[in-house]
Image: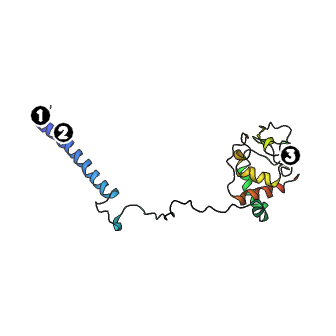
Amino acid sequence: MFDTMTMTKVLGAVCGTFLVFLLGGWAAELIYVGTESHDEEHAQGYVIDVPESGGGEPAEAEPEVTFEEAFEVADATAGEGVFRNCRSCHALEDGSNGVGPHLFGVVGRDVDAVADYAYSGALEEAADVWTEENLYAFLQDPQGYAPGTKMSFAGLRDPADRANLIAYLATNPGS
């Protein structure tokens, strides 16, 4: 059964398989790695130019938009689109609380005015009334404005989004 010819065929098959793997590895290296030439004309990847900073000085930060500047051009219609971020936890209908309290008439309302909602207590320490300015600061960084608040939302970084959302909430009946 295992004569010399069978052993030769098995050894030939093993060597042939090994040769196929070697040739495949060589071809893949040519395709993905390229040649040993590292000149700029044949360099792999992209070069990203990074401007040199002047002696380790920090880069000039964008000027902070004030509440007044953002609120002058606030658009309630655009704020309705921003409210989509809030819908998962808040409702606009009076008395229908979700994970968070309802936002019916929130602008100008006392901070802990929703009777059937259990507030964390952190908001009462931060403000008394939800004025536009208080909402603007709170929506930027809820945890920074009222440490310990139940609201786990990271905040709205764009000042225009915050102002638009407040303008939309102010048009809500009851505001």
Question: What residue type is disc 2 on?
Answer: Val
Disc 2, SS: helix
Q: Give the labeled residue for mark 3.
A: 110
Q: Position of residue 44 (x, y in %)?
A: 37, 61
**Alpha carbon separation for disc pair 3 and 1:** 96 Å
The image quarter containing residue 9 is top left
Q: Nearer the viewer, mark 2 or mark 1?
A: 2
Q: Residue at x 29, y 63 (%)?
A: 37
Q: Position of residue 129 (x, y in %)?
A: 84, 48
Q: Give the labeled residue for mark 1.
A: 3
Checking the image for residue 84, the label placed there is none
Q: How is the image coloured?
A: rainbow
Disc 3, SS: loop
Q: Residue furthest right?
A: 174
Residue 68 relative to residue 108: left or right: left
Q: Give the mark nearer the N terminus: 3 vs 1.
A: 1
User: Few, some or many C-alpha atoms within 10 Å of disc 2 (few <14, some 14-19, many ≥20)?
Assistant: few
Checking the image for residue 10, the label placed there is 2
